[in-house]
Image (cartoon, grey):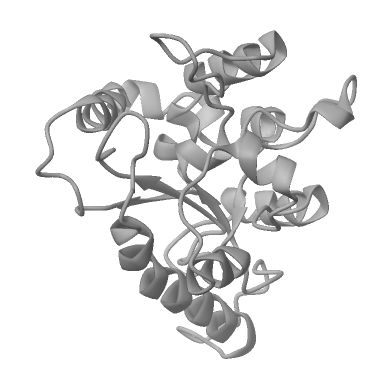
Amino acid sequence: PTTALAAPHFHGQGRLSALLLPSPAAPQAGPDIRLLSARKLVAHIDGGGKMEIRQALEAAGTDVFLDAATVRGLLPELETKDSLRCTFSGVVALSYAWVTPADPDPQRAQLQALRPVLVWWMCERARRKTVAYAGQVDATIQTADFGVFIDFMSMFQPDDTTGAKPAYTKPAEQASFDRALRNIGLLYGHAGSVTCIGTHGAQRQGHGEKSTRNTLSRI
């Protein structure tokens, strides 16, 4: 694992940029992984919102995602993380157990547990952007808001549930999911990102728990 984390793509912006920003060749398709806005996610939770698949959020026009310009502004933070700067990273990946394969958080318990963490993280980012910490203001922080990765909401999921096994209605979305899945370790293992491990639902045995454990064990 130490050798793998020393690889160049676990540092800097290169591979993450390709994963989190739209391809110049097809900007209308969106990135393979859409980061959620922490600020908008808090509002979504407060409004009774739950975890929904990315396609449903986009189709409904639910405003929970970071725009590309904000993502571009956050990425440089990942190159400057050290003991003094970017202590509160601009990219946080949630690792959690899916309660069921169809709905990882049917009672909204995991989002409710995440909410105070999001608020605290934003407050700390705002404070360190404007108040000297360890003798210096963190000039690398451009905004108190930050990107949150929740796989169910950030990646395309099977959206055709009419058959015995969930499937994709659009091949392009399945291809995007496959690319995202192959590179998901970048978000969990990047030197500048932070992984937040949720414990609600962890006692449930099944698809989600195994998936999360296996992903973390590979990085």
Tell me residue 96's x, y (percent). 29, 44
The image quarter containing residue 98 is top left
Toward the viewer: 65 or 76?
65
Tell me residue 35's x, y (percent). 61, 47
Toward the viewer: 90 or 202?
202
Left/right placement of residue 32 relative to residue 41 reads right
For the point 9% across and 44% down, the residue is 203
Tell me residue 188's x, y (percent). 41, 38
For the point 63% across and 11% down, the residue is 175
Left/right placement of residue 178 relative to residue 15 reads left
Left/right placement of residue 164 relative to residue 52 reads left
Question: How many numbered tags mark residues here?
Answer: 0
Is 165 rendered above or below residue 105?
above
Is 159 rendered above or below residue 52?
above
For the point 58% across and 16% down, the residue is 179
Q: Residue furthest front?
A: 162
The image quarter containing residue 168 is top right
Toward the viewer: 53 or 39?
53
- Quadrant (top left/top right/bottom left/bottom right) for the N terminus: top left
Judge whether residue 216 can be spotted in this image.
yes
Tell me residue 3's x, y (percent). 34, 22
- Quadrant (top left/top right/bottom left/bottom right) for the C terminus: top left
For the point 47% across and 37% down, the residue is 152
Toward the viewer: 190 or 80?
190
Left/right placement of residue 98 relative to residue 189 reads left
Judge whether residue 34 can be spotted in this image.
no
